[in-house]
Image: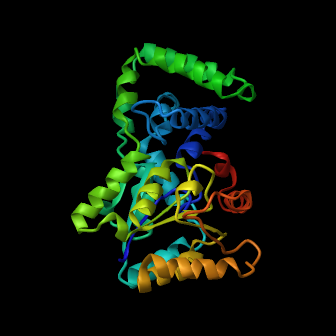
Amino acid sequence: MKFICFDLEGPLAPQDNAYDLMKSFPEGGRVFEVISRYDDVLTLEKREGYEPGDTLSLIVPFLVHHNITEVDIKAMANKAPLTPGAAELLGHLQRGGWQVFCASTSYQQYALTIAGRLRIPPERVACTTFPLDRFRAMLAVEDSRAIADLEKGMLGLDITRGDAIIKDTLDGLYSALSLTNLGRVLRSVKPVGGNRKVRALEKFGKEHRVSMLDWVVVGDSITDGRMLETVNAAGGLGIAFNANEYALPYATMGLASASLFDLKPILDAWEKGGRSTAEATVREKETQAAPAGRAHYQWLAGRPLADAVLQVHKAARRLVRQDAAKLG
């Protein structure tokens, strides 16, 4: 019962890799915020074949158009901060015999670099395959024009007018782009989010003979909801860390804190006696006053999501993730 799988962006590294890549060229951050909301809208409407996190395929045209390379992604990962307490917690777990895995929507160049810094072997990382440099070689003149039109359309969009405007506008823009060479690229990128994270967990479980009820998983956003829900329903431990409203309702428990290391007592309890001991530990800690910015624990399974819980997670999320906190 010592198998744990982390989402990467949030629990292990506070940056949003795709957001930061987009911010490396003028107005790219603004474009990404529109696409990120589009991702949320398509996920919530349950569009057929769409998974949360498919944002990472939708931004490919812009990365190609603005000459972002695979080397750029690796360089960003080498310089990226780690979530406070992440290195300490993973070191503690690895020394204690825990088997540590990662299921991340992030591009492989970013996810594998961060995981390597935390001593998670590459074969225990599920992430988004992303041959960006090969995609660039496919770019034709007409593709460049189509991407420029796509970017112009997004920058001219007033996102305060509501989700319906975002959906209708971007549906049209991406429909036009699908007729170019890069349309094939968009269809080939399959970010590891939503149900794909569940399948990654199933694959890890099959390889290591671990059932869903023996997993601990840690996530924070819309890409983690299905993974948290599946493990919680099976009787495992789904932990929402500094999470948003798209993850918290599906988790077994929550932790809002400035340090991931505050998970240690809960994981120690899980190791000692499974879910019932973890629940008893969380419920005891719920009654204790938390130091400023640290260790707000909540047992969520079987309870409706309270607004006070959401607000404390939002505050911790802003503190730890800063700009990335506003993304779904």
Dividing the image into 4 quarters, which one contains the C terminus? top right
Q: Is residue 63 visible?
A: no
Left-right relation of 170 to 213: right
Q: Picture coordinates of residue 20 (x, y %)?
A: 59, 46
Q: State how the image is colored.
A: rainbow
Q: Residue at x 66, y 62 (%)?
A: 320
Q: Residue at x 57, y 16 (%)?
A: 149
Q: Which corner quadrant of the image does residue 120 belong to?
A: bottom left
Q: Which corner quadrant of the image does residue 304 belong to?
A: bottom right
Tally of numbered tags: 0
**Whether residue 169 is situated above or below residue 223 in the rendered picture:** above
Q: Picture coordinates of residue 64 (x, y %)?
A: 46, 31
Front-lying residue, 313 or 109: 313
Q: Picture coordinates of residue 181 (x, y %)?
A: 36, 19
Give the residue furthest to the front. 302
Left-right relation of 304 to 131: right
Q: Is residue 304 visible?
A: yes
Q: Residue at x 42, y 79 (%)?
A: 274
Front-lying residue, 274 or 130: 274
Q: Which corner quadrant of the image does residue 95 belong to?
A: bottom left
Left-right relation of 86 to 131: right
Q: Picture coordinates of residue 42 (x, y %)?
A: 52, 32
**Whether residue 267 is situated above or below residue 323 in the rendered picture:** below
Dividing the image into 4 quarters, which one contains the N terminus? bottom left
**Whether residue 110 is situated above or below residue 178 in the rendered picture:** below
Front-lying residue, 166 or 286: 286
